[in-house]
């Protein structure tokens, strides 16, 4: 007996109203993963080709702290602890950059995999969903980048006046990458809320009634996903997410106005 699963979008032909075997389902998933991986590899190659300007771009927040607070940082040069660390840092930068460049393709492959399981009225959200997800992730990442020097300054100042700052390049690159990823993922929150309202999983009234709990959850999640844990970064992420929460409710209200919901 063959196990039949809901069809999730085979490449090359439409079987939306049919079913897939488990083997076909896994083959479709593999095809989507391969396309996403190739997009990431292509993005990594592009970042590697422009490594030096990308590195200068990444270290700019640290340079801003050095220029603004020479009393805190006397030496702004990065250092390595081994012969392979510089190479590893280059690979990390290319990986983070490749993921960002490949994000539209990755999100599109995810959507194409799950969209056939949705109703026809939900499928029309495909392009707006992918585009808005990319835009909000990029906005969140750049918001983290342009406010990173504030968090760095706070963290460095708490090291103590007798502590000499000397940043290891691999750890600094990982810190910047994780911060940008945390803000980028956090900024996907309103996109998810709007989508759940449009497909009827959540109602605007439910979100309005639970705004106190939502704010508490937002602050806790912001504290969890930010690698630095400093109050400056926590506030910089939490405040926009709270604003996005109410904006998402308003957009959801406009999108579902006149629609009846089952209690």
Image: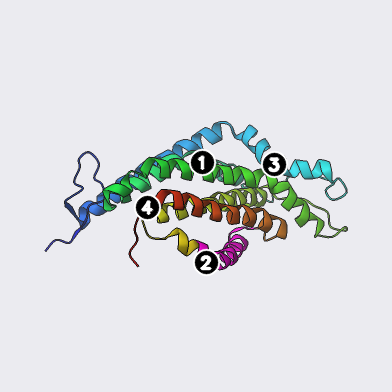
Which residue is drawn at the image coordinates 22% and 52% (left, top)? 7
Instruction: Name, please, the residue furthest toward the left.
Output: 1
Give residue 182's position: percent from left, percent from top: 57, 53
What's the distance in space between the residues labelled 2 and 4, CA to CA? 22 Å
Give residue 128's position: percent from left, percent from top: 41, 41
* Label at residue 59: 3
What's the distance in space between the residues labelled 4 and 3, CA to CA? 51 Å
- The secondary structure that dominates the magenta segment is helix
Q: Is residue 68 left or right of residue 123?
A: right
- The residue mark sitting in front, 4 or 3, is 4
* Label at residue 258: 4
* Label at residue 135: 1
What's the distance in space between the residues labelled 4 and 1, CA to CA? 29 Å
* Label at residue 210: 2
First in sequence, mark 2 or 4: give its number: 2
What's the distance in space between the residues labelled 2 and 3, CA to CA? 41 Å
- Label 2 CA crowd tier, 10 Å (few <14, some 14–19, many 20+): few
First in sequence, mark 3 or 1: give its number: 3
First in sequence, mark 4 or 1: give its number: 1
């Amino acid at each position: 007996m063959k196990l039949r699963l809901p069809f999730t979008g085979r490449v090359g032909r439409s079987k939306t109203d049919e079913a897939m075997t488990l083997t076909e389902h896994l083959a479709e998933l593999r095809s989507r993963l391969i396309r996403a991986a190739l997009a990431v590899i292509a993005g990594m190659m592009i970042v590697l080709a422009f490594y030096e300007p990308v590195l200068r771009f990444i270290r700019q927040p640290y340079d801003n702290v050095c220029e603004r607070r020479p009393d805190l940082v006397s030496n702004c040069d990065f250092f390595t602890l081994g012969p392979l660390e510089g190479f590893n840092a280059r690979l990390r930068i290319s990986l983070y950059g490749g993921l960002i460049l490949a994000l539209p393709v990755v999100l599109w492959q995810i959507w194409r995999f799950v969209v056939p399981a949705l109703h026809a009225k939900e499928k029309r959200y495909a392009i707006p969903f992918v585009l808005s997800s990319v835009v909000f992730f990029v906005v969140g990442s750049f918001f983290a980048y342009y406010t990173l020097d504030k968090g760095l300054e706070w963290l460095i100042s708490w090291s103590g006046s007798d502590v000499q700052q000397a940043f290891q390049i691999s750890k600094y690159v990982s810190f910047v990458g994780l911060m940008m990823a945390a803000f980028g993922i956090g900024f996907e929150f309103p996109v998810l809320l709007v989508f759940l309202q449009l497909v009827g999983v959540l109602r605007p009234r439910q979100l309005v009634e639970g705004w106190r709990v939502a704010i508490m959850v937002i602050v806790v999640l912001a504290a969890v996903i930010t690698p630095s844990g400093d109050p400056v970064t926590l506030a910089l992420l939490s405040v926009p997410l709270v604003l996005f929460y109410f904006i998402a409710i308003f957009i959801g209200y406009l999108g579902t106005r006149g629609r009846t919901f089952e209690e």
